[in-house]
Each structure stands twice: as C-alpha cells, then as structure tokens.
Image: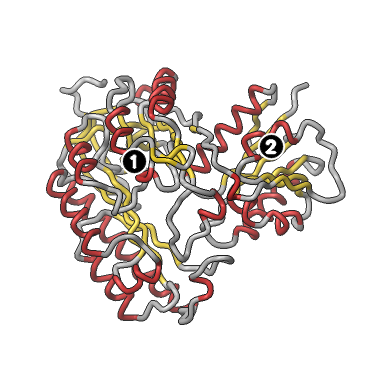
Amino acid sequence: MSRRVAFYTLGCKLNFSETSSIGRVFQNAGYETKPFNTQADIYVINTCSVTDNADKKCRKVVREALNHSPNAYIVVVGCYAQLKPQEITQIPGVDLVLGAAEKFNIVDHINDLTKQPKAIVHNAPIGEINQFVSAFSIGDRTRTFLKVQDGCDYSCTFCTIPLARGASRSGAIHDIVQQAESIAASGVKEIVLTGVNIGDFGIREGERKERFFDLVKALDGVNRIDRFRISSIEPNLLSDEIIEFVARSCRFVPHFHIPLQSGSNRILGMMRRRYKRELYASRVAKIKALMPDCCIGVDVIVGFPGETLEDFLDTYHFLNNLDVTYLHVFTYSERENTIAAQMEGAVPGTQRNERSNMLHILSEKKRRAFYENQLGKKGEVLFEGDIKDGYMQGFSRNYIKVRTPYDPLLVNEVVPMRFTAITDNGEMEAIELPELLHH
C-alpha cells in the first residue's frame, strides 16, 4: 500500500503555489495525497510568519493532524520554519522542520518515517539561499497561482520576509512562459502571478537579467490562457508602461493589488517604504484614467510604532478620498529581529484594534460603492466548481464576486453576464447574456 500524505497551508498565495508543487514531488515519489481531515502517514504543514500567532496556529494544526492519525509523521516547512526552527521543535508531535531551501527536497529527508525523541531540523542560513525554485498550484481547475519571483531585497522595518525567504531572485521568462503553456494545456483559464516582490522580477545569480514588464509582455502571448492577474505589486515598481499595457491587453485583467501600508509620509519614512503617498495617489489616478472599472486593492498597517492619532487619521482620510476598491487591513504586531520592534512609541492594543475596525468599515463601504457602480454593466465571469447553499461563485475580470444557481455546465467557463443586484452578504447577482456565446 502506498504511503499517504496530507497538506495544510497557512498564509499567502505564494505558499499555496509551493504546497501544490511539494505535493507533486510526493506524487512523483509514489505517495497518495489525502485530504487533511483524514488519516495519513505524513502531514506537511506549510507555515507563515507574516500574520500573528504563527506558533499558536502551528500547534493547533499539528494537534488536528495527530487527532486524525496519532502515529503520523509531522513535517513543518515555510517561513516560520526558517525563522524559528527551534521553537517549532518544542511543539509536541513535530518530527521534522525544513527551512526555505530544504522544503523542496522534502522526500529526501523523510524516506524513513521513524519518529525520533526530538524533532530533526534541516535549515540552511538564509544568506546561503540563492536558487529560485519554481512552483504553481493545480487542483482548483479555474485558477492557478504561478510563482515567478521569491525573496526580497527591500528592508522595510516591520518585515521578516527577507529573513525567511532571502534575497530577491526569479525564474527566467522563457521557463515561466513554458510553465504557463503547460498550465493552459491542463484546462486552466486564469493564472495569478505570485511572488514576494514581483515588480522586482528578473534577478538571477544576484544580477538583473530581465524586467517584470518583459515578463508581462511575454505572457500576454500565451493564447490558451484567458486571464492573467497580477497578485500584488509595489507602487514604486508599478510603472506607467505596465499600467498602459494592462489597459490595452486582452489577457491581463483590470485588477491591481498595491500595498500602501500608511497614508502618512512620516510613517512611510519610518517603515522605510520606497515612495511617498503622492506617488501612490498618482498611480491610482493613472489606472482609473485608463481603466475606470479597474479594481484596486490596498494593503495597510495600523498601529505601527509611533503612529499618532493624527497619523492614522491622515491614512484614513487619504484612503477615503482615494478611488480604491477594498482594503486588506493588518494590525501591526512586533516581530523579532526587525527594526520596528525596537522603536519607541508602541501603540496600545485597544487603539490598534479601534483603528483596524475603522478601516474594515471603510473597506466595506468602498467595496459596496464599487459594486453599486457596476450594476447594469456587462462582465465576463469565470465560474468555480464549489457549491454553497445551491449556488456557485465566480469572479469577473475586475474581481467582482458573482453568485448564480449551480449549473455544472458553467464550471470553468467564462460566461458573459449582466450585473443585476447585490446580495445581503455583498456578492453580486448576475444574469447570463444569451445573445453572446460562451468562449
């Protein structure tokens, strides 16, 4: 009987693409993949260090795995495993901790599933890691997350990602286009480009060989993919030429996710961000001038050390007046080995939470206004296969979440629709346009 392996992923789209690739390594080695909530011989937990409570979340997932299979072999990989391997070895039940480089050779480390008295750690220093390992997620047939870049050379004072993932490095355009072609052959209609800092794409062996804009132009020629979506790009790297190209492109969709982090120039300076809010506003204005229906998402951090009420209100009013669609709000939390953790002026937890709540409410208001503006308009919706209460969901090119009664014929189809109403829980309802044929 073949060994059974199950996976659990915490964190970002990049982690999901890497878990999927690690899963294929196991399949090629003869393992059978099982759902996480069933019995397996090995459980692989891919961790994150960006959001809060990495330790707590990891413990909970390990406990859950051992509930399903008390004698299973537990492997922890990912950013938390690179940053704090010894902390993970203290979690009861963990057998193996693999760092950023080792996780892709995972099968080499676990051929003997004998549990040892103490967890084994394989974790090279992050400074030694310079190889780019490609990854993409397959499984959800409608959308694939394709990793094009890893690591980061920026030194934002709040961030541990350079410590967890190392220096910026990328695949070659030629190889990424080939991957996109093979993903297209599997029937996938949409590819989401992911990485840590994808606008910095093009560095190999420590030297810049290519540019992100060149990658965008090359992928635009992959005929069998309906849509490419850029997951997140720094405002200082989102050039006019990229915005103008996306506006003309049939494949790159009108949806940008652009981290802001603060609307106060004083705080942006303390964070060591590489732009001021004026540049951010000009990027949004440029996008909206060329693509009025474009969806724009924003990352923002509240409660950074030294953030006064005035700084926060600066951020609030800046965002309120900006033509953006939704906010991803992060409440600042101290991270070991970061400059920000040593800064004075810690914001009390209650104030951090109040500020977070205010921005969450603003985000809902923004999203609602965007959806209302789309009512009566036409859009192409790519439907996914999940059913919930008799409905299925899909996304338009500009990232409107649409629900419609389940119809198996619509799964993984791009369907022309007219947006008709907004549901109580904020999804769009739409009617199919019969005069237009499906792709």
- Tell whether 46 sits left or right of 219: right
Q: Is residue 40 above or below residue 434?
A: below
Amino acid type of the residue that numbered disc 1 sits on in the rendered structure: Ile
Task: Pick the quarter of the image with the N terminus.
Answer: top right
Task: Pick the quarter of the image with the C terminus.
Answer: top left
Disc 2, disc 1: CB below 8 Å? no
Residue 252: percent from the left, percent from the top?
Answer: 27, 34
Residue visible at 83% across and 51% down in the picture:
118
Q: Secondary structure at mark 1?
A: strand
Q: Is residue 222 above or below residue 382?
A: above
- Tell whether 62 sits left or right of 315: right
Residue visible at 47% across and 65% down in the picture:
158
Q: Nearer the viewer, mark 2 or mark 1?
A: 1
Question: Is residue 429 or residue 330 the one in the foreground?
Answer: 330
Residue annotated with mark 2 = 38
Kindly identify which numbered label has been placed on residue 230.
1
Task: Locate residue 49: give its quadrant.
Answer: bottom right
Q: Is residue 1 above or below residue 157?
A: above
Assess disc 1: are there few (<14), some (14-19) or many (≥20) residues with their C-alpha within 10 Å of its C-alpha.
many
Task: Locate residue 352: give its quadrant.
Answer: bottom left
